[in-house]
Amino acid sequence: MKARAFSYFRAATIDQALDAHARAGDDARFIAGGQSLVPALSLRLQAPRLLIDITHIDDLRGVRREGGHLRIGALTRHCEMLSELLIAEFAPLLHAVAPFVAHPAIRNRGTFGGSIALADPASEFPAMTLALDAEIEIAGPSGRRRVRADDFFIDLFETALQPGELIIAVYVPLFKADQRFAFDELARRRGDYALVGCGMLATFAGDRVDDIRISFFSVGNTPTRVKGAEAILIGSRLDAGRIATAQGALEGDLAPPDSDEVPPAMRLHLARVLLGRLLGRLGEGA
Amino acid sequence: MRGLDEPLLDETDETVRVRFVVNGRKVACEVAPRDTLVDCLRDKLELTGTHAGCEMGACGACLVQLDGRAVHSCLIFAVQADGARIETIEGLTESGMLAELQAEFHRRNALQCGFCTSGMLINAHELLSQTTQPSRDEIRDALSGNYCRCTGYEAIVDAIEAVAKARSDGGGAT
Amino acid sequence: MSAPLTSLDRPNSYIGRSVPRPNAKRLLAGRGRYVSDLKLPRMLYAAFLRSPHAHAKIVSINIDEARAIEGVHLVATGADLAKICTPWVGTLDHFKGMTSAPQMPLPLDRVVWAGQAVVAVVAESRAIAEDALELIEIDYEDLPVVADLDSARQVGGALVNPGSANNICFRSQLDNGTVDDAFAHAAHVVEEEFSFGRHTAVTLEPRALVADYDPAAGMLTVHHGTQTPYQFQDLYSRHYGIPEARVRVIATDIGGSFGMKLHVYHEDMAVVGLSILLGRPVKYVADRIESFVSDIHARDHRVRARMALDAKGGILAVDVVDLTAIGAFSTFPRTSVVEGNQVIRLIGAPYRFKNYRATLEVIFQNKVQTSQYRAVGHPIACAVTERLVDIAASKIGLDPFAIRAQNVIPDDAYPEISPTGYRFEALSHQTCLKRLHEMMDYDALRAEQADLRKRGVYRGIGIATFVEITNPSPAFYGVGGARISSQDGAIVSLTPSGEVRCLISVTEQGQGTEAIISQIVADQLGLALEHVKVVTGDTEVTPHGGATWACRGAGIGGETALQATRALKRNILEVAALILQAQPSALDIIDGEVVDAVTRKPRLPISEIARIAYFRSDTLPSGTQAQLTVSHHFAPQGYPFAFTNGIQGCALEVDVETGLIKLLKHFIVEDCGRVINPMLVDEQLRGGIVQGLGAALFEECRYSETGQLMNGSLADYLVPMPMEMPDIVIGHVETPTADTELGAKGVGEAGTAAASACVLNAVNDALAPFDATINSVPITPAKVLKALKRF
């Protein structure tokens, strides 16, 4: 289980990283925390000829307020989601989710941007960018752009990122006083990829849901917003009947893939259970 | 470390020189870019107290401290750690950082084959540096990525709990 | 001459005392010396190209490109190794009619499981060896795959060994009493089909060896992470034609074994051959992905069983059919049949009844071989028995404790012969049951369960009694023709400084073998523990013996050490008597001093006896030859096995909406005879229980229809991790065996034996209000939700 040989380049700036990638073409991969990439290389599932280390690029670091958003640098480590006060205050959903991401030593090294870029449909953070209506800032050979999370996740491990592009930061709208969030996942063991997981952010007008975004993971090829269920909840109180109707809508929102371990019908059932529990918590003030 | 102007793709298995501060001592060694840190520590620096159990970050046997944080040395290439400060079980033992935990693990037989032990100690050490009085559940959670096939974990949890308690009581370990 | 074994208040009384393991400090400091750490001068690294097919003909192999890579020293195929290694066959004579095809280090013309090693590369690094593997081209022609039990048994279906009549490896039957009659007249009959998933050992250190053949000396040294160095010395000698005295196997620290590392593996045999071909040390460490497809697997049984009971719940008869699918071969040298054999012989073991019938069918399939892994057969026998008992109890309206109390063999009834033919010397089911009931605070647990159930919280309480096989005599393997020793040897010396060194054939895998042997030696000689040094695991240093497996280390190894030490003590006292002009019987040794046996007054330090004997023998009476080294062997006699017993209990909670199970607490009362080191016994129990809990809830090697392992990595194969495991409460009962002075039996497998049965009973208890049942492990969320008809 040893990687195929490759060259290594440590970039000091975003431009250096992009330039190196442009020169190497399809044979290059960016590496940040590497917590998913390194095993893929060790297993020889991937074999780039050049690895471009972006972890020493200062511009990819840091968490700060920018207008109505929290700008979370791509290199922000999962453990910083727990320790960074700005995140606890302005993106509390991410703060609450972080302990569910893998294990402490992985969180010490894995990066937020890396997780979004990989877009593993079973991981927590990509799905949360959907719930948060986050925007992803991308740098590439043709300049910089911002892509809404809704438009970012395309298919299995496929995103809006083009070859040679890099995530710079993620912009999360600041958490507001009239908002509530909830998150949970069903996993057989702590830190495992979940059987089903879900995060949600809702804006309340009194006890009515003014707006809500609900995002599931481990339910298909991409993290998935359940817009049918959201529509049922918007404008309503979270009473038992409404919640049941929203649960019922999941059948139209989700199409879990077949797997030898978790049949689609079971995953759908688990998604309903989880949605019911989270909406219950949200109704109680989460 | 080579610069941008040097050829990037032509010498994929050429070794490069990396420098670390390992266990408080400056070291330099020649590694291929594909050498993981765990292989570098074990083979090049002969620090065999760090173990490789799964090579994919799922067992915790290879944990070392990198710039003060516990990380899987199987999930980092040695070149990525160039310039870093690394502490392994050997260094943490010599500096006495783990002494209370080691004594308590020994007293309670919180190890059998010993293969998971370095990783357990390094994670336990990090936990206790962040949380002075962890509950048993918090201890188990902190170790949730550390696999032990021998002990059933309880003695490990007991040992860590005992060290935390002894520290907060102001004394050494029991 | 010797004080009672367990009197803890006398000096040097170490038997029965919780003493930390002296060798653990090294491991805690990162100073272990595992085979995977070893680096020898001129050492090369092996890697193997593995078959992607579960069953295929090898049409051609092209190794030219691989051989041309810089840093590659050898690319070897099956044909290359067949020239120097003789084949082996995994059968034992006492399993009548058993068959298995001859095995070679690497296959010649056919692969029989996905993951089987086909070509070996030896290179200057493992990475280069893996580069070379990518350049080897093998042309395969697919053959029909036998991927499970049902297809293996299909008449006219695919065959694992083309040309054979069917896929049966072995069939066996037991029939005692009048089973049909008992069922015909029973007031109650319960019947169920059970299935047990395939799982594997997942030692944290994978299999590792360094073979070092020196052609100049004609000497093979193998540093081997194994439990059984002598067995491998014998096998390497025989299969490579090297005289036994020129084969040395060294088993240093080993990162877990659990039975998995005492089997012959094709790669391991190949690595020895590669070193012979190159005349250089060759290292092979299986990586985790390789471990999953090449380490032995275990279990994989389907059992149909029924139990007949009288109106009051007394067990009358049991009738069982056990079907088990092994690999394409039977494992060498212990076979893949022992597990099934132990299943059918252990079913019903705790209970008194007369009528028993069992059929065992062991079946080949195109998967990696199965064989002995911790608690061989026990968890299956226990789960089948204990489920039937619980099902009967619920049918008859008895509490699980009550039906067991009524049926277990009474503590005063021994010796007793089980309906399956096992001879029990003395067990303690009644005492253990009573103790467990108190320890669990059973009535309070039941009250809490009833209360929570009203609030929609579904707790389950389960118990499971068990019998464990330990200390096997030659009846286990020796009678079958295997060169696997059931005796052990020890060499005990008084050193010139008055310390004691014990070289012993039992080996250490972290369970504390060296610690308990040193406790026994120190105790029996009368010496402080720190003055005893125990050496294990080197065939050139330690005498031949069975080593460590089947829970024999304490019972057989310990008795060997005890008898050897007593002999040394006699010899020391004889010399002391000459020096002190006393009778040996009037002297004793306490804390390293020869004392007056009656007054306990110190007369002479044993270091002084050593000094005189080694350096001033001229001062001893003429004709005296001091014998301060004793070599001694001990083979178990009397009962063919030292059976142990116990009972486990657990409390858990089932989330009936998600199917997830939370283990709340686990309990065990165990009787392993004389306890030498209570702390180490407890740790054996805890570790064993957690392996059983892994089997109960998580562990399963899942295969596709084409025979591909679907979850062969540590990310996908779920081992028990800290967060999900409960705390475990332990109680002891001690019924020493009278077959030895020491009285110790084994304990390593007791935890694993009953943990999964216990959980299975508890889950069914939790699901009782829903009329849902599960009789299959692992108990996955999918099975729970299916049983509850939630999807």
Image (tube, rainbow, N blue to C red):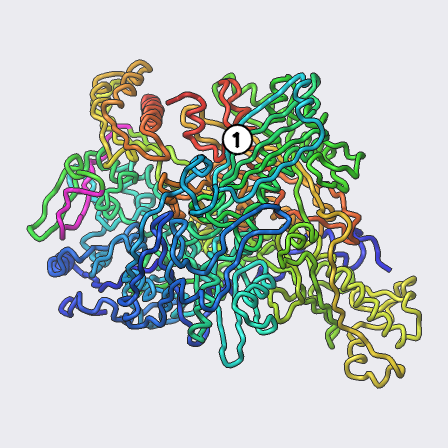
* Residue A171 lies in the magenta-colored region: yes
Q: In this view, does A115 lie to the left or right of C163?
A: left
Amino acid of disc 1: Phe
Q: Residue at x 86, y 79 (%)?
A: C624
Q: Is residue C452 left or right of residue C702?
A: right
Chain letter for mark 1, please.
C
In the displayed structure, A247 sits above or below B84; it is above
| Circle count | 1
Let me know if residue B169 appears in the view: no
Which of these two is toward me, C391 or C460? C391
Q: Residue at x 65, y 34 (%)?
A: C465
* Residue C126 lies in the magenta-colored region: no
In the displayed structure, C71 sits above or below C675; it is below
Q: In which quarter of the image is the N terminus of chain B?
A: bottom left
Q: Where is residue B10 in the image (x, y as percent from the top left)?
A: 17, 68
Q: In this view, does A270 lie to the left or right of B117?
A: left
Q: Where is residue B95 in the image (x, y as percent from the top left)?
A: 48, 65
Residue lying farthest to the top in this orientation: A241
Residue lying farthest to the left in this orientation: A142
Say which residue label 1 marks.
C194
Let me know if residue B119 appears in the view: yes
In the displayed structure, A137 sits above or below A219; it is below
Q: Where is residue C657 in the image (x, y as percent from the top left)?
A: 41, 24
Q: In this view, does A43 lie to the left or right of C326?
A: left
Q: What range of the chain is rendered magenta?
A: A157-180
Crowding around mark 1 (Cα neighbors within 10 Å: few <14, some 14 to 19, many 20+) is some
In the displayed structure, C694 sits above or below B70; it is above
> Is disc 1 placed on a helix, strand or loop?
strand
Q: Where is residue C428 in the image (x, y as percent from the top left)?
A: 74, 37
